């Protein structure tokens, strides 16, 4: 595997295009959406028109023919400006569409992927349950076959991104569909189209951060879907989603790197403009050293997620590297957000400044798609423990 993480001309052009979009389109508007806890439909529509939701999918399904490295480049650039739009894209691709592409039948792919790749509809994945958390194997949602062979689903899911927007098309949920000989559950994944009777979407959560993204609790009361809506093999839903999470951690690491770099960008700008005691605060070595450490963390994080993405793209084992990247990038995003707020002083506590939004958005990165503790467990397991 090549260790050269410099971008090809094509990827650099993609990066610059999304960088311009983030600064010219997202940055001027996202603050108002964030304050109003409103979903940025117009921004998401433009992202769809740019082909961002179809980046890692083949052209035959309406995609752009790219890969996870290309997706990560885009997520990093978006998150340098705002994490709500970045997580909307990440969840729509990694959790909403990718399981269909990896495990779906040809009929399922042709029915859903073109709409998901265009951004016409968003997909979501319902794994986490109110009593489950990191113990996702303790699924209580059930799905049984009725006399017609349809699946009848009962249960609930929580913290599900992209699950209740006006353009949400489907949620794939994990459910217990039977038991093995030893009594352990068979967990399967089943596609539930939005609007299916008995499928109830709660009001949006009141969140600390990611306020311009959609996150909700879902409930299923005798929700009936055809047998053909089973995604992949029966009893393999949990294993399928573990693979999905491995890939998603690469994407989250890229997003976290973007937030960390955005903290550097904003702090460098502020340190040059803000004067105290007759000179820019950036003239003080204490501020310079903070900025140097922040840049070091963002740079190292970038190397980590790109290494994991390169291994994924080349078909090499990447589970440990994905966990390393996700763990490091999420924790340094919190560090950089804290330091950026400190550099900005009182203004860092004002929502009109992007670093205040970044500080609020950073913490969830140590929790979502596998907590930092789970990442350490995975790394230790890969080391033989």
Image (spheres, rainbow, N blue to C red):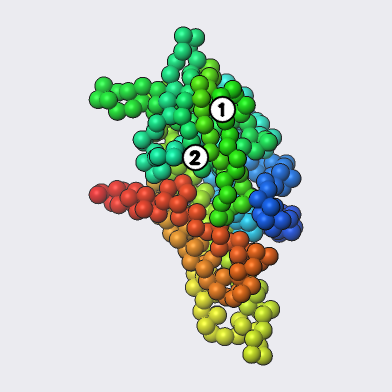
Q: Residue furthest bottom?
A: 278
Which residue: 56% across, 51% down?
A: 207
**Front residue of 216 and 151:** 216
Q: Residue furthest top?
A: 147
Q: Is residue 66 above or below residue 373?
A: above
Which residue: 67% across, 35% down?
A: 167
Q: How many marks?
A: 2
**Res. 8 in view:** no
Which residue: 60% across, 69% down?
A: 349
Which residue: 63% across, 34% down?
A: 168
For the residues labelled 1 and 2, the Cα–Cα distance comes to 13 Å
Quick one: label 1, few (<14), some, or many (20+) residues within 10 Å? many
Quick one: label 2, few (<14), some, or many (20+) residues within 10 Å? many
Residue 357 rendering spot, x and y as whole percentages: 61, 61
Residue 215 rendering spot, x and y as whole percentages: 57, 43
Residue matched to label 1: 199
Residue matched to label 2: 158
Q: Secondary structure at mark 1?
A: strand
Sequence-wise first label, 1 or 2: 2
Residue 333 rendering spot, x and y as whole percentages: 50, 62
Q: Quadrant of residue 106?
A: top right
Asked if the residue under mark 2 is in contact with the one under mark 1, i.e. CB atoms within 8 Å, the reply is: no
Q: Secondary structure at mark 2?
A: strand
């Amino acid at each position: 595997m090549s260790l050269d993480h410099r971008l090809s001309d094509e990827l650099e052009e993609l990066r610059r295009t999304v960088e311009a979009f983030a600064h010219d389109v997202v940055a001027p508007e996202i603050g108002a959406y964030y304050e109003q806890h409103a979903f940025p439909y117009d921004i998401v529509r433009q992202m769809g028109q740019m082909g961002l939701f179809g980046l890692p999918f083949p052209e035959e399904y309406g995609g752009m023919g790219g890969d996870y490295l290309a997706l990560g480049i885009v997520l990093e650039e978006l998150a340098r400006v705002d994490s709500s739009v970045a997580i909307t894209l990440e969840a729509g691709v990694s959790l909403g569409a990718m399981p269909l592409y990896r495990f779906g039948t040809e009929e399922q792919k042709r029915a859903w992927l073109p709409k998901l790749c265009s951004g016409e509809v968003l997909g979501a994945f319902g794994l986490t349950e109110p009593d489950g958390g990191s113990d996702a194997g303790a699924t209580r949602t059930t799905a049984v076959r009725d006399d017609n062979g349809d699946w009848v689903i009962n249960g609930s899911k929580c913290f599900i991104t992209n699950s209740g927007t006006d353009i949400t098309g489907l949620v794939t949920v994990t459910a217990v569909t039977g038991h093995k000989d030893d009594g352990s559950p068979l967990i399967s994944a089943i596609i539930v189209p939005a609007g299916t009777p008995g499928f109830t979407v709660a009001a949006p959560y009141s969140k600390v951060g990611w306020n311009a993204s959609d996150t909700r609790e879902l409930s299923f009361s005798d929700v009936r879907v055809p047998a053909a809506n089973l995604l992949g093999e029966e009893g393999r839903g949990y294993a399928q989603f573990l693979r999905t999470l491995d890939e998603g951690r690469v994407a989250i690491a890229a997003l976290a790197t973007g937030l960390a770099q955005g903290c550097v960008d904003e702090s460098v700008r502020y340190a040059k403009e803000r004067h105290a005691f007759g000179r820019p605060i950036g003239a003080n070595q204490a501020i310079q050293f903070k900025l140097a450490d922040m840049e070091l963390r963002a740079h190292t994080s970038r190397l980590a997620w790109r290494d994991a993405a390169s291994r994924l793209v080349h078909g090499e084992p990447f589970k440990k590297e994905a966990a390393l990247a996700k763990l490091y990038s999420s924790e340094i995003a919190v560090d950089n957000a804290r330091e950026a707020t400190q550099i900005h002083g009182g203004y860092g506590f004002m929502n009109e400044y992007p670093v205040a939004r970044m500080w609020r958005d950073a913490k969830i990165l140590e929790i979502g798609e596998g907590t930092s503790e789970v990442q350490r467990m995975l790394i230790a397991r890969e080391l033989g423990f």
